[in-house]
Protein backbone atom coordinates (compact mmCIF):
# COMPACT_ATOMS: atom_id res chain seq x y z
CA UNK A 1 0.00 0.00 0.00
CA UNK A 2 1.29 3.46 -0.91
CA UNK A 3 1.80 5.79 2.04
CA UNK A 4 -0.70 8.28 0.59
CA UNK A 5 -3.41 5.65 0.97
CA UNK A 6 -2.86 5.76 4.72
CA UNK A 7 -3.22 9.54 5.01
CA UNK A 8 -6.23 11.14 6.69
CA UNK A 9 -5.44 14.71 5.66
CA UNK A 10 -3.31 16.03 2.81
CA UNK A 11 -2.59 19.68 2.11
CA UNK A 12 -0.74 20.45 -1.08
CA UNK A 13 -1.11 24.07 -2.24
CA UNK A 14 -3.17 23.38 -5.34
CA UNK A 15 -6.87 23.68 -4.49
CA UNK A 16 -8.00 26.84 -2.76
CA UNK A 17 -10.27 29.88 -2.87
CA UNK A 18 -10.80 32.96 -0.72
CA UNK A 19 -11.14 31.75 2.86
CA UNK A 20 -10.41 28.07 2.11
CA UNK A 21 -7.45 25.78 1.52
CA UNK A 22 -8.76 22.35 0.65
CA UNK A 23 -7.77 18.98 2.01
CA UNK A 24 -7.23 17.14 -1.27
CA UNK A 25 -8.44 13.86 0.20
CA UNK A 26 -12.17 14.36 -0.54
CA UNK A 27 -13.45 12.02 2.19
CA UNK A 28 -11.77 9.79 4.68
CA UNK A 29 -8.33 8.54 3.76
CA UNK A 30 -8.84 7.40 0.19
CA UNK A 31 -9.27 8.99 -3.20
CA UNK A 32 -12.78 8.61 -4.73
CA UNK A 33 -13.62 5.35 -6.45
CA UNK A 34 -15.07 5.14 -9.98
CA UNK A 35 -18.43 6.40 -8.77
CA UNK A 36 -16.88 9.45 -7.12
CA UNK A 37 -17.72 8.10 -3.66
CA UNK A 38 -15.86 6.37 -0.84
CA UNK A 39 -18.23 3.80 0.58
CA UNK A 40 -17.62 3.19 4.26
CA UNK A 41 -15.75 6.45 4.91
CA UNK A 42 -17.82 9.16 6.52
CA UNK A 43 -15.08 11.39 7.94
CA UNK A 44 -15.39 15.13 7.36
CA UNK A 45 -13.43 16.69 4.56
CA UNK A 46 -11.31 18.68 7.07
CA UNK A 47 -10.66 21.70 4.88
CA UNK A 48 -8.53 24.52 6.25
CA UNK A 49 -10.13 27.87 7.04
CA UNK A 50 -7.90 30.71 5.89
CA UNK A 51 -7.94 34.32 7.07
CA UNK A 52 -5.81 37.43 6.53
CA UNK A 53 -8.08 40.14 7.89
CA UNK A 54 -9.67 42.70 5.59
CA UNK A 55 -6.64 44.45 4.10
CA UNK A 56 -5.29 44.13 0.56
CA UNK A 57 -1.57 44.56 1.26
CA UNK A 58 -0.33 41.00 0.63
CA UNK A 59 1.69 39.92 -2.43
CA UNK A 60 3.18 36.68 -3.66
CA UNK A 61 5.55 35.41 -6.36
CA UNK A 62 3.31 33.67 -8.89
CA UNK A 63 3.98 30.65 -11.11
CA UNK A 64 5.54 32.93 -13.75
CA UNK A 65 8.07 34.18 -11.20
CA UNK A 66 6.48 37.64 -11.02
CA UNK A 67 5.33 39.61 -8.01
CA UNK A 68 1.54 39.54 -7.91
CA UNK A 69 -0.55 42.08 -5.99
CA UNK A 70 -4.18 42.75 -5.22
CA UNK A 71 -5.70 44.69 -8.12
CA UNK A 72 -8.96 46.60 -8.28
CA UNK A 73 -10.74 48.66 -10.93
CA UNK A 74 -12.35 51.35 -8.79
CA UNK A 75 -14.74 52.42 -11.56
CA UNK A 76 -18.17 50.83 -11.67
CA UNK A 77 -19.83 49.87 -14.97
CA UNK A 78 -16.37 50.22 -16.50
CA UNK A 79 -17.59 49.20 -19.96
CA UNK A 80 -21.26 50.10 -19.66
CA UNK A 81 -21.03 53.80 -20.42
CA UNK A 82 -24.81 54.09 -20.82
CA UNK A 83 -25.26 53.43 -17.09
CA UNK A 84 -26.18 56.31 -14.80
CA UNK A 85 -22.85 55.86 -12.99
CA UNK A 86 -21.44 57.82 -15.94
CA UNK A 87 -22.66 61.40 -16.26
CA UNK A 88 -22.78 62.30 -19.97
CA UNK A 89 -22.35 66.05 -20.56
CA UNK A 90 -23.30 67.33 -24.02
CA UNK A 91 -22.53 63.86 -25.37
CA UNK A 92 -24.06 60.45 -25.99
CA UNK A 93 -22.90 56.83 -26.07
CA UNK A 94 -24.12 53.87 -28.12
CA UNK A 95 -23.10 50.23 -27.67
CA UNK A 96 -22.22 47.66 -30.32
CA UNK A 97 -19.08 49.10 -31.92
CA UNK A 98 -16.21 46.79 -32.85
CA UNK A 99 -13.76 46.62 -29.94
CA UNK A 100 -9.95 46.28 -30.08
CA UNK A 101 -10.14 42.50 -29.82
CA UNK A 102 -12.64 41.85 -32.62
CA UNK A 103 -15.79 41.70 -30.52
CA UNK A 104 -18.71 44.15 -30.53
CA UNK A 105 -18.24 45.48 -27.01
CA UNK A 106 -16.95 48.96 -27.75
CA UNK A 107 -18.98 52.18 -27.64
CA UNK A 108 -19.57 55.10 -29.98
CA UNK A 109 -19.00 58.31 -28.02
CA UNK A 110 -20.45 61.35 -29.84
CA UNK A 111 -20.76 65.06 -29.23
CA UNK A 112 -24.20 66.69 -29.26
CA UNK A 113 -24.85 69.84 -31.32
CA UNK A 114 -24.08 72.43 -28.63
CA UNK A 115 -21.77 75.03 -30.12
CA UNK A 116 -18.41 76.15 -28.71
CA UNK A 117 -18.45 73.98 -25.61
CA UNK A 118 -17.02 70.85 -23.94
CA UNK A 119 -18.32 67.35 -24.66
CA UNK A 120 -17.41 64.67 -22.12
CA UNK A 121 -18.52 62.12 -19.57
CA UNK A 122 -17.48 61.70 -15.96
CA UNK A 123 -17.70 59.39 -12.93
CA UNK A 124 -17.25 60.29 -9.28
CA UNK A 125 -14.46 58.60 -7.31
CA UNK A 126 -13.34 58.46 -3.68
CA UNK A 127 -9.72 57.35 -3.89
CA UNK A 128 -6.40 58.78 -2.77
CA UNK A 129 -2.71 58.24 -3.43
CA UNK A 130 -0.98 57.22 -6.65
CA UNK A 131 -3.44 56.21 -9.36
CA UNK A 132 -3.67 55.41 -13.06
CA UNK A 133 -6.69 56.04 -15.31
CA UNK A 134 -6.81 54.17 -18.61
CA UNK A 135 -9.20 53.65 -21.52
CA UNK A 136 -9.05 52.22 -25.04
CA UNK A 137 -9.90 54.85 -27.67
CA UNK A 138 -10.06 55.24 -31.47
CA UNK A 139 -10.61 58.28 -33.68
CA UNK A 140 -14.10 58.70 -35.15
CA UNK A 141 -14.44 62.14 -36.69
CA UNK A 142 -12.30 63.70 -33.94
CA UNK A 143 -8.68 62.69 -33.38
CA UNK A 144 -7.97 63.85 -29.85
CA UNK A 145 -8.84 62.38 -26.44
CA UNK A 146 -8.36 64.24 -23.18
CA UNK A 147 -8.37 62.47 -19.81
CA UNK A 148 -8.45 64.28 -16.52
CA UNK A 149 -7.76 62.49 -13.25
CA UNK A 150 -8.50 64.95 -10.42
CA UNK A 151 -6.38 68.05 -11.07
CA UNK A 152 -4.05 66.52 -13.69
CA UNK A 153 -4.77 66.05 -17.39
CA UNK A 154 -3.28 64.57 -20.55
CA UNK A 155 -4.07 64.73 -24.28
CA UNK A 156 -3.74 61.85 -26.75
CA UNK A 157 -3.41 62.08 -30.55
CA UNK A 158 -5.38 59.09 -31.85
CA UNK A 159 -4.51 59.81 -35.48
CA UNK A 160 -0.75 59.58 -34.97
CA UNK A 161 -0.43 57.51 -31.80
CA UNK A 162 1.49 60.08 -29.75
CA UNK A 163 0.79 61.83 -26.49
CA UNK A 164 0.20 65.56 -26.46
CA UNK A 165 0.54 68.04 -23.63
CA UNK A 166 -0.06 67.02 -20.04
CA UNK A 167 0.16 68.25 -16.47
CA UNK A 168 0.44 64.76 -14.99
CA UNK A 169 2.23 64.21 -11.72
CA UNK A 170 3.81 60.96 -12.97
CA UNK A 171 3.32 60.07 -16.64
CA UNK A 172 1.04 59.83 -19.65
CA UNK A 173 1.43 57.22 -22.39
CA UNK A 174 -0.44 55.32 -25.07
CA UNK A 175 -0.04 51.78 -26.39
CA UNK A 176 -1.01 50.66 -29.89
CA UNK A 177 -3.77 48.02 -29.58
CA UNK A 178 -4.17 47.55 -33.36
CA UNK A 179 -6.71 48.64 -36.00
CA UNK A 180 -6.52 52.29 -34.94
CA UNK A 181 -7.09 51.56 -31.26
CA UNK A 182 -4.82 52.81 -28.47
CA UNK A 183 -4.84 52.17 -24.77
CA UNK A 184 -4.33 55.63 -23.27
CA UNK A 185 -3.28 56.10 -19.65
CA UNK A 186 -2.47 58.88 -17.23
CA UNK A 187 -0.84 58.35 -13.82
CA UNK A 188 -0.77 60.89 -11.01
CA UNK A 189 0.61 61.03 -7.48
CA UNK A 190 -2.63 61.88 -5.63
CA UNK A 191 -6.19 60.98 -6.63
CA UNK A 192 -7.81 62.80 -3.70
CA UNK A 193 -7.75 66.38 -5.02
CA UNK A 194 -10.99 66.04 -7.04
CA UNK A 195 -13.89 63.57 -6.67
CA UNK A 196 -14.28 62.93 -10.43
CA UNK A 197 -12.52 61.55 -13.50
CA UNK A 198 -13.24 63.03 -16.96
CA UNK A 199 -13.11 61.64 -20.52
CA UNK A 200 -13.29 64.38 -23.21
CA UNK A 201 -13.59 64.56 -26.95
CA UNK A 202 -10.96 67.19 -27.81
CA UNK A 203 -10.53 69.51 -30.80
CA UNK A 204 -6.73 69.38 -30.57
CA UNK A 205 -3.80 69.31 -28.20
CA UNK A 206 -4.77 71.35 -25.15
CA UNK A 207 -8.15 72.26 -26.65
CA UNK A 208 -11.34 70.73 -25.22
CA UNK A 209 -13.70 73.38 -26.66
CA UNK A 210 -15.33 72.02 -29.81
CA UNK A 211 -15.50 75.08 -32.03
CA UNK A 212 -18.56 76.04 -34.04
CA UNK A 213 -21.60 73.80 -34.03
CA UNK A 214 -20.64 70.10 -34.02
CA UNK A 215 -22.64 67.73 -36.20
CA UNK A 216 -23.53 65.37 -33.38
CA UNK A 217 -22.38 62.44 -35.52
CA UNK A 218 -18.64 62.68 -34.84
CA UNK A 219 -16.64 61.73 -31.77
CA UNK A 220 -14.54 58.75 -30.66
CA UNK A 221 -14.83 55.03 -30.13
CA UNK A 222 -14.16 53.97 -26.52
CA UNK A 223 -13.79 50.73 -24.62
CA UNK A 224 -12.89 49.47 -21.10
CA UNK A 225 -12.13 52.27 -18.64
CA UNK A 226 -10.07 51.51 -15.55
CA UNK A 227 -8.90 53.39 -12.46
CA UNK A 228 -6.43 51.65 -10.15
CA UNK A 229 -3.83 52.19 -7.44
CA UNK A 230 -0.79 51.73 -9.64
CA UNK A 231 1.98 53.57 -11.44
CA UNK A 232 0.81 52.07 -14.76
CA UNK A 233 -2.27 50.50 -16.31
CA UNK A 234 -2.50 46.75 -15.71
CA UNK A 235 -4.69 44.12 -17.37
CA UNK A 236 -8.27 45.32 -17.65
CA UNK A 237 -10.75 44.21 -14.96
CA UNK A 238 -14.41 44.46 -15.93
CA UNK A 239 -16.82 45.90 -13.36
CA UNK A 240 -20.58 46.23 -12.97
CA UNK A 241 -22.32 47.59 -9.88
CA UNK A 242 -19.28 46.37 -7.93
CA UNK A 243 -15.66 47.05 -8.70
CA UNK A 244 -13.54 44.50 -10.56
CA UNK A 245 -10.97 42.64 -8.44
CA UNK A 246 -8.13 40.20 -9.17
CA UNK A 247 -4.75 39.02 -7.94
CA UNK A 248 -4.06 38.38 -4.26
CA UNK A 249 -7.58 38.92 -2.97
CA UNK A 250 -8.63 39.43 0.64
CA UNK A 251 -8.36 36.08 2.49
CA UNK A 252 -6.93 34.29 -0.57
CA UNK A 253 -4.21 31.78 0.44
CA UNK A 254 -0.90 32.84 -1.08
CA UNK A 255 0.64 30.03 -3.08
CA UNK A 256 4.15 31.36 -3.56
CA UNK A 257 6.69 30.16 -6.15
CA UNK A 258 9.81 31.91 -4.83
CA UNK A 259 11.55 28.56 -4.49
CA UNK A 260 10.30 27.21 -7.82
CA UNK A 261 7.53 24.89 -6.63
CA UNK A 262 4.33 26.25 -5.12
CA UNK A 263 4.29 26.63 -1.33
CA UNK A 264 1.74 28.08 1.07
CA UNK A 265 3.19 31.37 2.33
CA UNK A 266 2.30 32.12 5.95
CA UNK A 267 3.64 35.31 7.51
CA UNK A 268 3.11 37.39 10.64
CA UNK A 269 1.69 40.89 10.39
CA UNK A 270 4.13 43.50 9.10
CA UNK A 271 3.77 47.24 8.40
CA UNK A 272 5.26 48.96 5.35
CA UNK A 273 6.44 52.32 6.67
CA UNK A 274 7.45 54.02 3.43
CA UNK A 275 4.59 56.19 2.13
CA UNK A 276 5.66 55.63 -1.48
CA UNK A 277 7.12 52.19 -2.13
CA UNK A 278 7.22 52.56 -5.95
CA UNK A 279 6.76 56.26 -6.64
CA UNK A 280 10.28 57.47 -5.88
CA UNK A 281 9.26 60.92 -7.06
CA UNK A 282 7.65 61.18 -3.64
CA UNK A 283 11.04 60.76 -1.91
CA UNK A 284 13.63 63.47 -1.28
CA UNK A 285 15.89 63.44 -4.31
CA UNK A 286 19.37 64.62 -5.11
CA UNK A 287 20.17 63.28 -8.53
CA UNK A 288 17.36 62.34 -10.91
CA UNK A 289 14.38 59.98 -10.76
CA UNK A 290 12.60 59.05 -14.00
CA UNK A 291 9.46 56.98 -13.52
CA UNK A 292 8.08 54.02 -15.47
CA UNK A 293 11.25 53.41 -17.46
CA UNK A 294 11.76 49.64 -17.12
CA UNK A 295 9.94 46.38 -16.50
CA UNK A 296 9.95 45.59 -12.79
CA UNK A 297 9.81 42.18 -11.03
CA UNK A 298 6.03 42.68 -11.27
CA UNK A 299 6.26 42.25 -15.05
CA UNK A 300 4.97 45.73 -15.95
CA UNK A 301 6.81 48.95 -16.79
CA UNK A 302 6.68 50.60 -13.38
CA UNK A 303 10.35 50.58 -12.35
CA UNK A 304 12.14 53.93 -12.05
CA UNK A 305 15.61 55.02 -13.14
CA UNK A 306 17.75 56.64 -10.45
CA UNK A 307 20.67 58.61 -11.89
CA UNK A 308 23.46 60.38 -10.04
CA UNK A 309 25.91 62.88 -11.53
CA UNK A 310 27.90 63.89 -8.44
CA UNK A 311 29.39 62.01 -5.49
CA UNK A 312 27.01 61.65 -2.58
CA UNK A 313 23.77 62.17 -4.50
CA UNK A 314 21.00 59.94 -3.21
CA UNK A 315 17.28 59.48 -2.74
CA UNK A 316 16.06 59.42 0.85
CA UNK A 317 13.03 58.97 3.06
CA UNK A 318 12.90 60.78 6.41
CA UNK A 319 10.79 58.26 8.34
CA UNK A 320 11.96 58.25 11.97
CA UNK A 321 12.12 54.93 13.79
CA UNK A 322 13.87 53.33 16.76
CA UNK A 323 14.34 49.59 17.18
CA UNK A 324 15.17 46.64 14.92
CA UNK A 325 14.21 47.41 11.32
CA UNK A 326 14.75 45.88 7.89
CA UNK A 327 15.24 48.12 4.84
CA UNK A 328 14.91 46.56 1.38
CA UNK A 329 14.56 47.62 -2.25
CA UNK A 330 14.58 45.89 -5.64
CA UNK A 331 17.54 47.06 -7.76
CA UNK A 332 18.84 46.32 -11.26
CA UNK A 333 22.07 47.71 -12.66
CA UNK A 334 22.09 50.00 -15.69
CA UNK A 335 25.64 51.36 -15.92
CA UNK A 336 27.04 51.33 -12.39
CA UNK A 337 28.29 48.38 -10.39
CA UNK A 338 26.25 48.54 -7.23
CA UNK A 339 24.22 50.32 -4.59
CA UNK A 340 24.65 51.36 -1.00
CA UNK A 341 21.82 51.26 1.55
CA UNK A 342 22.25 53.53 4.55
CA UNK A 343 20.24 54.30 7.66
CA UNK A 344 21.46 57.58 9.11
CA UNK A 345 20.88 57.31 12.87
CA UNK A 346 22.63 57.69 16.21
CA UNK A 347 24.64 54.66 15.09
CA UNK A 348 24.76 54.53 11.28
CA UNK A 349 24.06 51.33 9.38
CA UNK A 350 25.46 50.70 5.89
CA UNK A 351 25.56 47.88 3.37
CA UNK A 352 27.18 47.85 -0.09
CA UNK A 353 25.92 45.45 -2.76
CA UNK A 354 27.57 44.33 -6.00
CA UNK A 355 24.76 44.12 -8.57
CA UNK A 356 26.65 41.75 -10.84
CA UNK A 357 26.09 38.85 -8.44
CA UNK A 358 24.13 40.24 -5.47
CA UNK A 359 27.05 39.85 -3.10
CA UNK A 360 27.44 42.09 -0.06
CA UNK A 361 30.75 43.86 -0.58
CA UNK A 362 30.92 45.53 2.80
CA UNK A 363 28.69 46.45 5.74
CA UNK A 364 28.83 48.03 9.17
CA UNK A 365 26.43 48.69 12.01
CA UNK A 366 24.02 45.95 10.86
CA UNK A 367 22.61 42.62 12.02
CA UNK A 368 22.22 41.10 8.57
CA UNK A 369 22.50 42.02 4.87
CA UNK A 370 21.90 39.97 1.74
CA UNK A 371 20.38 39.99 -1.74
CA UNK A 372 17.61 37.78 -3.17
CA UNK A 373 17.70 36.93 -6.88
CA UNK A 374 14.39 37.79 -8.62
CA UNK A 375 15.60 36.98 -12.13
CA UNK A 376 16.30 39.18 -15.14
CA UNK A 377 19.20 40.79 -13.19
CA UNK A 378 16.86 42.11 -10.46
CA UNK A 379 18.04 41.80 -6.87
CA UNK A 380 16.09 42.50 -3.72
CA UNK A 381 18.83 43.93 -1.51
CA UNK A 382 18.17 44.32 2.19
CA UNK A 383 19.80 45.04 5.50
CA UNK A 384 18.66 44.74 9.11
CA UNK A 385 19.92 46.97 11.90
CA UNK A 386 19.22 48.12 15.42
CA UNK A 387 18.67 51.86 15.01
CA UNK A 388 17.95 54.80 17.28
CA UNK A 389 16.26 58.01 16.15
CA UNK A 390 16.83 57.65 12.40
CA UNK A 391 17.35 60.84 10.39
CA UNK A 392 17.50 59.58 6.80
CA UNK A 393 17.09 56.28 4.99
CA UNK A 394 19.15 56.49 1.81
CA UNK A 395 20.00 54.79 -1.47
CA UNK A 396 23.28 55.64 -3.31
CA UNK A 397 24.87 54.39 -6.53
CA UNK A 398 28.36 52.85 -6.24
CA UNK A 399 30.94 51.10 -8.40
CA UNK A 400 30.18 47.79 -6.70
CA UNK A 401 32.55 48.52 -3.85
CA UNK A 402 32.53 51.27 -1.23
CA UNK A 403 33.18 54.03 -3.78
CA UNK A 404 30.52 56.32 -5.25
CA UNK A 405 29.90 56.01 -8.98
CA UNK A 406 27.92 58.39 -11.17
CA UNK A 407 25.38 56.63 -13.34
CA UNK A 408 22.06 54.81 -13.14
CA UNK A 409 20.22 51.89 -11.59
CA UNK A 410 16.61 50.77 -11.85
CA UNK A 411 14.58 50.80 -8.62
CA UNK A 412 11.28 49.23 -7.57
CA UNK A 413 9.50 48.28 -4.36
CA UNK A 414 11.28 49.87 -1.39
CA UNK A 415 10.23 48.64 2.05
CA UNK A 416 10.92 49.58 5.65
CA UNK A 417 9.51 47.22 8.28
CA UNK A 418 9.98 46.51 11.97
CA UNK A 419 11.61 43.10 12.35
CA UNK A 420 14.86 41.23 12.06
CA UNK A 421 14.28 39.76 8.59
CA UNK A 422 12.79 40.84 5.28
CA UNK A 423 9.21 39.77 4.55
CA UNK A 424 7.23 39.67 1.30
CA UNK A 425 6.73 42.95 -0.52
CA UNK A 426 3.97 45.28 0.76
CA UNK A 427 2.97 48.02 -1.73
CA UNK A 428 2.10 51.51 -0.49
CA UNK A 429 0.90 54.07 -3.02
CA UNK A 430 0.59 57.06 -0.73
CA UNK A 431 -0.90 56.13 2.64
CA UNK A 432 0.97 58.38 5.06
CA UNK A 433 0.56 56.17 8.13
CA UNK A 434 1.97 53.13 6.38
CA UNK A 435 0.23 49.98 5.13
CA UNK A 436 -0.17 46.86 7.25
CA UNK A 437 -0.34 43.32 5.94
CA UNK A 438 -2.33 41.22 8.43
CA UNK A 439 -1.07 37.85 9.62
CA UNK A 440 -2.00 34.72 7.69
CA UNK A 441 -4.06 32.19 9.64
CA UNK A 442 -4.74 28.65 8.40
CA UNK A 443 -6.40 25.98 10.55
CA UNK A 444 -8.94 23.17 10.78
CA UNK A 445 -11.10 23.03 13.90
CA UNK A 446 -13.31 20.15 14.99
CA UNK A 447 -10.90 17.78 13.27
CA UNK A 448 -10.71 14.96 15.84
CA UNK A 449 -11.71 12.42 13.19
CA UNK A 450 -8.63 13.06 11.01
CA UNK A 451 -6.17 13.30 13.92
CA UNK A 452 -4.81 10.10 15.40
CA UNK A 453 -5.91 10.31 19.02
CA UNK A 454 -3.75 7.53 20.45
CA UNK A 455 -1.15 7.29 17.69
CA UNK A 456 -0.33 9.05 14.47
CA UNK A 457 2.23 10.78 12.25
CA UNK A 458 2.55 14.37 11.07
CA UNK A 459 4.62 15.31 8.02
CA UNK A 460 5.57 18.62 6.46
CA UNK A 461 7.74 19.77 3.59
CA UNK A 462 8.83 23.36 4.21
CA UNK A 463 11.03 25.85 2.40
CA UNK A 464 12.87 27.29 5.39
CA UNK A 465 14.96 30.45 5.48
CA UNK A 466 17.01 30.93 8.61
CA UNK A 467 15.93 34.03 10.54
CA UNK A 468 18.47 36.00 12.61
CA UNK A 469 16.14 36.31 15.59
CA UNK A 470 17.46 36.93 19.08
CA UNK A 471 16.06 34.83 21.87
CA UNK A 472 14.60 31.40 21.19
CA UNK A 473 10.97 31.55 20.10
CA UNK A 474 9.58 28.25 18.91
CA UNK A 475 7.87 28.44 15.54
CA UNK A 476 5.12 25.95 14.76
CA UNK A 477 5.05 24.62 11.21
CA UNK A 478 2.30 22.09 11.89
CA UNK A 479 0.66 21.89 15.31
CA UNK A 480 -2.08 19.65 16.65
CA UNK A 481 -3.91 21.36 19.49
CA UNK A 482 -7.15 21.07 21.46
CA UNK A 483 -8.55 24.48 20.49
CA UNK A 484 -7.13 26.38 23.46
CA UNK A 485 -4.89 29.42 23.01
CA UNK A 486 -1.99 27.71 24.72
CA UNK A 487 0.24 24.63 24.40
CA UNK A 488 -1.04 22.70 27.40
CA UNK A 489 -2.38 19.88 25.20
CA UNK A 490 -0.56 19.77 21.91
CA UNK A 491 1.83 18.09 19.49
CA UNK A 492 4.12 20.53 17.71
CA UNK A 493 6.44 20.04 14.77
CA UNK A 494 8.43 23.20 14.14
CA UNK A 495 11.64 25.17 14.39
CA UNK A 496 13.46 26.59 17.37
CA UNK A 497 15.23 29.88 16.62
CA UNK A 498 18.17 30.33 18.96
CA UNK A 499 20.18 33.42 19.76
CA UNK A 500 22.87 34.16 17.19
CA UNK A 501 20.69 33.10 14.28
CA UNK A 502 20.94 29.33 14.73
CA UNK A 503 17.80 27.40 13.77
CA UNK A 504 17.02 23.75 14.48
CA UNK A 505 14.11 21.36 13.98
CA UNK A 506 12.17 20.85 17.19
CA UNK A 507 9.15 18.81 18.22
CA UNK A 508 7.35 18.12 21.45
CA UNK A 509 4.26 16.51 22.96
CA UNK A 510 2.46 18.12 25.92
CA UNK A 511 -0.41 16.46 27.79
CA UNK A 512 -2.25 18.29 30.62
CA UNK A 513 0.53 20.89 30.65
CA UNK A 514 3.23 18.26 31.22
CA UNK A 515 5.88 17.68 28.55
CA UNK A 516 5.73 14.04 27.45
CA UNK A 517 8.33 14.01 24.66
CA UNK A 518 10.82 16.52 23.30
CA UNK A 519 13.28 15.99 20.43
CA UNK A 520 15.75 18.50 18.97
CA UNK A 521 17.51 18.36 15.63
CA UNK A 522 20.88 19.81 14.72
CA UNK A 523 21.33 23.28 13.25
CA UNK A 524 19.75 23.82 9.82
CA UNK A 525 20.57 26.24 7.01
CA UNK A 526 18.42 27.70 4.24
CA UNK A 527 16.70 25.06 2.16
CA UNK A 528 13.81 22.63 1.78
CA UNK A 529 13.21 20.18 4.61
CA UNK A 530 10.99 17.13 4.80
CA UNK A 531 10.13 16.50 8.44
CA UNK A 532 8.06 13.73 10.01
CA UNK A 533 7.16 13.14 13.64
CA UNK A 534 5.55 9.85 14.69
CA UNK A 535 3.78 9.53 18.02
CA UNK A 536 2.34 6.74 20.15
CA UNK A 537 2.39 6.18 23.88
CA UNK A 538 6.03 5.56 24.85
CA UNK A 539 7.08 5.52 21.20
CA UNK A 540 8.05 8.83 19.52
CA UNK A 541 10.42 9.46 16.58
CA UNK A 542 11.60 12.44 14.53
CA UNK A 543 12.95 12.13 10.97
CA UNK A 544 14.40 14.90 8.77
CA UNK A 545 15.33 14.44 5.10
CA UNK A 546 15.50 10.66 5.34
CA UNK A 547 17.45 10.40 8.58
CA UNK A 548 16.38 9.65 12.11
CA UNK A 549 17.07 12.65 14.36
CA UNK A 550 15.93 11.25 17.67
CA UNK A 551 13.48 9.12 19.61
CA UNK A 552 11.72 9.20 22.96
CA UNK A 553 10.37 6.09 24.67
CA UNK A 554 8.36 7.62 27.48
CA UNK A 555 5.19 9.71 27.35
CA UNK A 556 1.45 9.80 26.73
CA UNK A 557 -0.64 11.37 23.92
CA UNK A 558 -3.21 14.16 24.52
CA UNK A 559 -6.69 14.38 23.02
CA UNK A 560 -6.56 16.78 20.06
CA UNK A 561 -9.12 18.47 17.79
CA UNK A 562 -7.39 21.24 15.84
CA UNK A 563 -4.80 21.39 13.04
CA UNK A 564 -2.82 24.62 12.62
CA UNK A 565 -0.38 25.54 9.88
CA UNK A 566 2.36 28.07 10.53
CA UNK A 567 1.74 28.71 14.23
CA UNK A 568 1.35 27.06 17.63
CA UNK A 569 -2.16 28.13 18.69
CA UNK A 570 -4.92 30.47 17.58
CA UNK A 571 -3.60 33.77 18.96
CA UNK A 572 0.08 32.98 18.41
CA UNK A 573 2.18 35.85 17.01
CA UNK A 574 5.14 33.70 15.88
CA UNK A 575 4.25 32.69 12.31
CA UNK A 576 6.63 30.69 10.16
CA UNK A 577 7.29 33.39 7.51
CA UNK A 578 8.06 30.59 5.07
CA UNK A 579 6.39 28.38 2.51
CA UNK A 580 4.79 25.04 3.37
CA UNK A 581 4.87 22.79 0.31
CA UNK A 582 2.97 19.89 1.85
CA UNK A 583 1.34 18.89 5.14
CA UNK A 584 0.00 15.41 5.83
CA UNK A 585 -1.61 13.60 8.76
CA UNK A 586 -1.73 9.85 9.34
CA UNK A 587 -3.88 8.19 12.00
CA UNK A 588 -1.24 5.58 12.69
CA UNK A 589 2.34 5.68 13.89
CA UNK A 590 4.23 4.90 10.68
CA UNK A 591 7.13 2.51 10.94
CA UNK A 592 10.65 3.89 11.05
CA UNK A 593 11.26 2.56 7.56
CA UNK A 594 8.16 4.39 6.33
CA UNK A 595 9.30 7.60 8.07
CA UNK A 596 12.66 7.38 6.34
CA UNK A 597 11.00 6.82 2.96
CA UNK A 598 8.48 9.64 3.52
CA UNK A 599 11.17 12.22 4.30
CA UNK A 600 13.81 11.06 1.81
Image: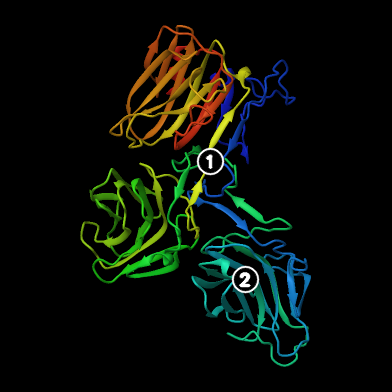
Query: Residue 510 at x, y = what percent?
Result: 46, 15
**Residue farthest to the bottom?**
212
Circle 2 sits in a helix, a strand or a loop, which is it?
strand
Query: How is colour applied across the structure in the image?
Result: rainbow
In 3D space, how far apart are the residues under numbered discs 1 and 2 (Cα atoms)?
35 Å
As displayed, is residue 459 above or below residue 413? Answer: above
User: Dot 1 surroundings within 10 Å: few (below 14), some, or many (20 or more)?
Assistant: many
Task: Say which of 38 and 68 sits in front.
Answer: 68
Question: Which residue is at a point 66% across and 62% down the rendered structure image?
Answer: 75
The mark found on residue 329 in the picture is: none
Query: In the figure, residue 22 lies in which quadrant?
Result: top right
Query: Residue 452 at x, y = what percent?
Result: 56, 15
Question: Which residue is at a point 38% across and 57% down the rendered structure image?
Answer: 319
Left or right, 313 with respect to 377, comes to: left
Name the residue tied to disc 1.
255
Query: Residue 552 at x, y = what percent?
Result: 40, 10
The mark found on residue 178 in the picture is: 2
Query: Residue 544 at x, y = what percent?
Result: 40, 23
Circle 1 sits in a helix, a strand or a loop, which is it?
strand
Amino acid sequence: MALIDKASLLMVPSTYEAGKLYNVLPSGNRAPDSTGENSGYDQTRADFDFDRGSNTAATRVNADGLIEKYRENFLTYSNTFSNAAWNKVRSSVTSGATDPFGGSNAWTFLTDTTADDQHYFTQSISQSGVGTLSIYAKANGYNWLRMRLPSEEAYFDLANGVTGSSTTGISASMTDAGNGWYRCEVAISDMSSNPNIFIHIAEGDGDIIIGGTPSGSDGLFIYAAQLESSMVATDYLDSTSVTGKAGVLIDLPRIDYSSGAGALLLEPSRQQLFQYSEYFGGWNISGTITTNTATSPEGVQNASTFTTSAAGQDIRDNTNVTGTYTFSVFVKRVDVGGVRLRIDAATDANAYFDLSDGSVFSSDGIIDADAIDYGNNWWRVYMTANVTNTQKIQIFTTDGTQSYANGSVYLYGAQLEAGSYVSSYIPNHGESGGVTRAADSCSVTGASDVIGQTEGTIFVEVDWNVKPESGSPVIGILTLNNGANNLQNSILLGIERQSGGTNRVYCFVVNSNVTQAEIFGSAITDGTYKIAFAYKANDFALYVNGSQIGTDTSGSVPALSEVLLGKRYGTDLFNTSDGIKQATLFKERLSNAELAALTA
